[in-house]
Image: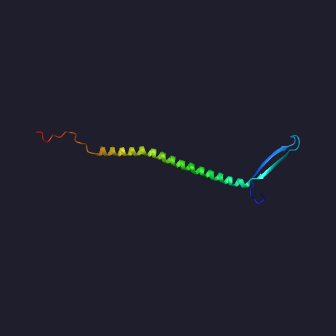
Amino acid sequence: MPDGSIKHIHVVAHPLGEASGPLEYVGALMDVTAESVPRRRCSRRKRSLLHVTRVTTLGELTASIAHEVNQPLAAIITNGEACLRWLGNTTPNLEEPAAPWSA
């Protein structure tokens, strides 16, 4: 438009006459700007919502994978620390002591 605004129109037309002569069309157009603007806003909001949903799903997936990886690693560390404590202990005396009542 001359003022820089954009109008959305819906056009329906069909050709008149034979293809051998000059082409003329008969049709109608309708200004659909009032319906188009809310539709575009809705589409933008829908895309934004879909993006938020994808990011949320990705965050949940990441947390799940982190949990599945951390659980075995925690078990490995715990068992390793137990083994180090076990290896750090003094060697037990495996000789059976004499019973105090035997002579």
Q: How did the renderer colour the structure?
A: rainbow
Q: Residue at x 38, y 45 (%)?
A: 77
On the image, the x and y values in percent for residue 92 come to: 24, 42
Which image quarter holds the C terminus? top left
Q: Is residue 58 left or right of residue 30?
A: left
Q: Is residue 2 left or right of residue 59?
A: right
Q: Is residue 19 left or right of residue 98?
A: right
On the image, the x and y values in percent for residue 28 come to: 81, 49
Q: Residue at x 48, y 46 (%)?
A: 64
Which image quarter holds the N terminus? bottom right
Q: Residue at x 89, y 42 (%)?
A: 21
Outermost bottom residue: 3
On the image, the x and y values in percent for residue 48 come to: 61, 52
Label total for image: 0
On the image, the x and y values in percent for residue 19 come to: 86, 40
Query: Which residue is at the front of the view, 11 or 96?
Result: 11
Outermost left residue: 103
Q: Is residue 98 left or right of residue 48?
A: left
Q: Residue at x 59, y 50 (%)?
A: 51
